[in-house]
Image: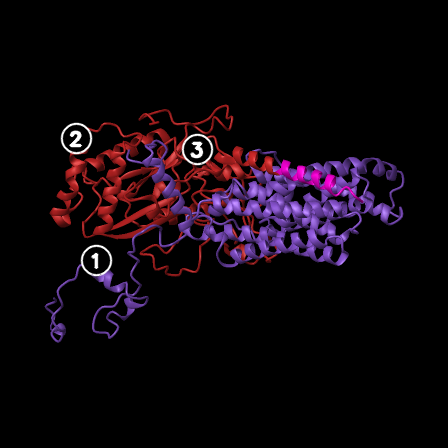
Chain colours: A red, B purple
Amino acid sequence: MTAQPGRQVANPTADAHYEHPHSRRGFFTDTSICIGCKACEVACKEWNRNPADGDYEILGSSYDNTGALGANTWRHVAFIEQDRERIEQARSSGRALVDLGMPGVGPPPARTGSARTAPSATASTGETGGAPSSEGTAPPDSPEFRWLMSSDVCKHCTNAGCLDVCPTGALFRTEYGTVVVQEDVCNGCGTCVAGCPFGVIERRTDGLVTTPPSRDLPASVKRPQTGIAQKCTLCYDRMKDDETPACAKTCPTTSIKYGRREEMLSTARERVAQLHEQGMTEARLYGANPDDGVGGTGSIFLLLDEPEVYGLPPDPRVPTADLPRMFKRAGLAMAGMVAATATAFALGGRR
Amino acid sequence: MTASEFDSYRPPEPPRRRRRDRDRRSKGGAGSWFKRGGDGAREMPVVPDAEVEPYTSYYGRPVVKAPPWKKEIALYLFLGGVAGGSALLALGGQVTDRTALRRNGRLAALGAAGAGSLALITDLGRPERFLNMLRTIKPTSPMSLGSWVLAAFSTCAGVAAAAEVDELTAERLPLGPLRAVLRTTAPVAGAGAGLLGAPLAGYTAVLLSDTAVPTWNAVREDLPFVFVSSASLAASGLAMITTPVAQAGPARALAVMGAVGELVAQNVMERRADHVAAEPLHQGRPGRMLSWSERLVVAGGLGTLLAGRRRWAAVLSGAALLTSSALTRFGVFYAGLESAKDPRYTVEPQRRRLEARRAAGQTGDSITTAG
């Protein structure tokens, strides 16, 4: 079954029974033009008043000293250094995707022709790599070495694992199709942390940024957002005022784009086709397929290698998809337990 | 080369090596990055080289996050099972008129459910908001359904146990006219707790499996059977300890059935699960817990079968079964937490199932697309 290009994307607000839903909003993170400046991380922390993570240690993972997404880090820039061997592997795995006839691949003219010949052509031109295009946005990509940089964020899934398993209803679907935690409802049970197939949401263990006046407060005064699950809200507060989320607003290269999800999807498809035409067959989309394990994501990514290279799961599946089956198995097991007990009383009848 | 006269004493630079070759050389051992140029003759890197190993993961960091659950949750898994099984045994005792079995079962059900609830509440990030668990009824959330089951179960078990306490203390509880009400509702409450016992013992399996934690998710088909078996043998073990052998016949029978059930279910579970995702069940502390649990099940089951009518043997076997059940729950719990820490358990099974689907020509459901 292959999805048609431009097929109507499910808007999860319908499931949430909004009477007047807005268009679904999302990010498109084009990692091919990310320069790794981490301005998105800073803007996110500042706008959302998120506390610092860790002790400013050097993690030994290229320029990534942030580590991972978490309760206090809602944007995380990944840095990956690759040699020629890895670049070639990424090219061929990307080309394999094209050859598979993955969904949404339109018939871009002369795609296959250039895709087949270009890698060797780029390799021979040496340092110039990534064939300079008329747009001038071709990623710096030398055959000797490349740096992958990617700003990761909550995926705001169509079928969100965290939202499904939340017992209190603290996590909810907004009218924009995003997933947000209500800070005053969450009791910090931690189920959503396990429910997320992307490892995004986390329970916050420390408090907010301590401003000078609040530093004098006794320790017994609870910081309002301690102990509850936290993750990217896609700047719900800004969105309601028709503002762009902080990270997208600050991104100097427009690597992070924000808008209606359909627009993001078509932008992403155009961009990946453009890169394929330039011979960069390693370019691929992540989260654009409405038939995948999470029903497509609100945040679409353009990646230049396999998802696991960036720390993303290669085939995520929302755990709740198997829940009816699990309930059936559990029901059978429970019936077995009752039957066994009844049998035990029949067998152990002698008093 | 620089043109500066200060550099004139430097030896000529060796020809540039390809980066790939250098990396191959530096794979030799940890720490080689700082030995390079360590004599001060050449420029020295300030930070270690980033790994350029073939990536299957992002610097070995986890893809999914382990839930922030501590040992209290594992303890609850065990206590919930004991409570559920005990309530079922108490209901049996109530129906077949075994007063000691009924009384001990009811008291154990309330005690275990109460202690388990406290363990759950202390593990919350905001314990003062525990009542938010009953804010909605959400069928997609096993924890929501489980909270309702636990609340209803505890209420029933509480009423049933109150009647037993009243009887034990020779009607010394200051109940007044409520005593008659308690007397009439106790059997109904006992039946209610008994019927909710199996769901209470089994829902935790769904709660664990309905997550992205690799090991828990991989054993989703068979974990409920392991958990209800474990609950049955634990509750029977407790009843064998607390109840005189004359009335504990059904508990002994259930203990043997539970032991057989658990041995079978656990083997089937480990065999049917994805072999990579099931690895943490055999390794380290969780692996040791689970293998000891298996040994104790065998010992307790055999002890019950062969010498269960002797009081001391019943007590010993019961203790073995209880310990085994606790070890099973803790083992499964910690194996899951371990599996979330290593990206291999997330990436490898996912990659394999993706390749298998692609090989079968099913290409429409991948999250990665060419356009």
Residue at figure coordinates x 20%, y 60% from the top left: B21
| Percent of width and height locating residue B292 | 57, 57
**Type of amino acid under label 2:** Ala
Label 1 residue SS: helix
Give the mark, 3 or 2, whose residue is nearer the N terminus: 2
**Type of amino acid under label 3:** Thr
User: Foreground residue, A164 or B324?
Assistant: B324
Measure the C-alpha gap from mark 3 to mark 2. Answer: 34 Å
Measure the C-alpha gap from mark 2 to mark 1. Answer: 34 Å
Report the magenta stretch's main SS. Answer: helix
Q: Residues within 10 Å of mark 1 (few under 14, many from 20)?
A: some
Let me know if residue A234 is in the magenta part.
no
Q: Residues within 10 Å of mark 3 (few under 14, many from 20)?
A: many
Quarter containing the C terminus of chain B: top left
| Percent of width and height locating residue B27 | 28, 63
Query: What segment is highlighted magenta in the picture?
Result: A334-351
- The residue at which mark 3 appears reads as A158
Say which of marks 3 and 2 sits in front: 2
Label 1 and label 3 in one chain? no
Q: Which mark is residue B20?
A: 1
- The residue at which mark 2 appears reads as A110
Residue at figure coordinates x 13%, y 49% from the top left: A126
Q: Is residue A243 visible?
A: yes
Vertical placement of residue B227 versus A7, above or below = below
Label 3 residue SS: loop
Label 2 residue SS: loop
Q: Which mark is residue A170?
A: none
